[in-house]
Image (cartoon, rainbow, N blue to C red):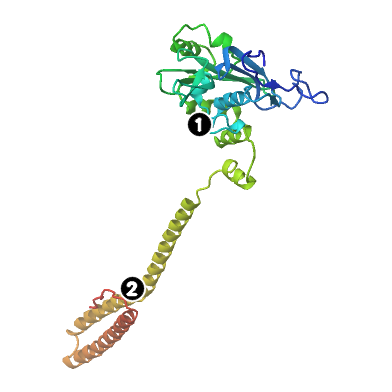
Amino acid sequence: MNEILASAPVANVEAPPPHPLPLAGEDRVGADRTGMRLYRCEFFNWGTFHGRVWGLDLNGDNTLLTGDIGSGKSTLVDAITTLLVPAQKISYNKAAGADARERDLKSYVLGHYKSERGESGFVAKPVALRDLNTYSVILGRFRNDGFQQEVTLAQVFSFKDTHGQPIRFYVVADLPLTIAEHFSGFGSDINALKKKLRSMPRVEVHDTFPPYSASFRRRFGIENEQALDLFHQTVSMKSVGNLTDFVRQHMLEAFPVEARIDALMAHFDNLNRAHESVLKAKAQIARLSPLIADCDHHAALMEEVIAMRGCRDALRPGCSDGVARAWIWTWAGLASGLLRSMTRKAISAISAMKSNEQSPKMVAIV
């Protein structure tokens, strides 16, 4: 901590261990420092950190916060959580094992630090360090030493009405920002601060969390929002009741089993119906193929009959009536035999179809 609030003790920061581990602030360009690391946090009017800018230098190292009860350890953790986790998923003061309703965003922005009973002595009301005319800022500077990349995240809180929760806007910058330099000196209108930040190069200002989250997750290389849920669960964890349940709920993506099974069954039904249609078409083709062959044979016989009739008519002028009649009876007998044979085949085919409970259309045989 840069400074200590006199009215309430604050958390202490454990110094990093001695050599052989590198010391905080030491040049580590050659070390394995790839990845976004939190280098500095700043707070203005957040919880009991009141009236001026408070800073915590982490230098990208693991940091241990120690302090008495009420010194502000959970307040610092909740500020970092607020920077990274959507409001509807945050349970404030979880690190202290407190009830979910004990603290909320409004209590941090107003600086509730104790409760006092009224004149009736029955109802306890919170006592705040600030009124509704102030504003609050939390800021975190992250750095990726491996790629010489620096990103600043910040959120600014203020009140629009007396009964609701604070309103806020979100800032993502590709350069180091500080509260004292970049979030002050704008007058009494919070919109002037927003306009000032928007005019700065390499600074993005968002009014809602989703685009803000997408912006910093893209810079941090976080593809899945579930990673932030896991961060929220682990950063303030007191104990793990069931490790298996914890892994399932916070580390594994939800798998839509029922939807997948329903889709698989529907796909199988479609394939089954398609297979049955193919088998039915093959059976129809197998039963109709003989009829087609018989029709072709019938057409060939009819051509022969027509040719024979032509021959018969050509014999009449040059033959006696007896010879002509002999030819006629001969050819008529042949044609009659062929037609009887075709009729028997057609009757046999129709009988076979009826025995298979089919109802094919009758083919007229001329």
Q: In which quarter of the image is residue 150?
A: top right
Residue 160, compared with residue 299, is above or below; it is above
Depth order, front residue of 75/138: 75
Label disc, if present, on residue 159 of the rendered structure:
none
Residue 185, compared with residue 111, is above or below; it is above
Q: Quadrant of the C terminus?
A: bottom left
Q: What residue sits 35% from the left and 79% below the top?
A: 356
Depth order, front residue of 74/35: 74
Report x, y in % for residue 161. Answer: 40, 18
Please report whichever mark, 1 or 2, sits nearer to the chain's N-terminal start: 1
Q: Distance between the residues labelled 1 and 2?
A: 85 Å
Q: What residue sits 60% from the left and 30% below the top?
A: 221
Depth order, front residue of 202/286: 202
Of all residues, the one furthest to the front in this rendering is 120
Label disc, if present, on residue 101 of the rendered structure:
1
Is any part of residue 206 visible from this angle?
no
Report x, y in % for residue 346. Answer: 30, 81
Report x, y in % for residue 302. Answer: 26, 78
Pointer 2: what residue?
292
Q: Residues within 10 Å of mark 1 (few under 14, many from 20)?
A: few
Amino acid type, residue under disc 1 in the picture:
Arg
User: Could you tell me which secondary element the residue under label 2 belongs to?
Assistant: helix
Amino acid type, residue under disc 2 in the picture:
Ile
Left or right: where does residue 165 sit relative to residue 151? left
User: Could you tell me which secondary element the residue under label 1 belongs to?
Assistant: loop
Depth order, front residue of 297/289: 289
Q: Check if mark 1's residue and mark 2's residue have beta carbons within 8 Å.
A: no
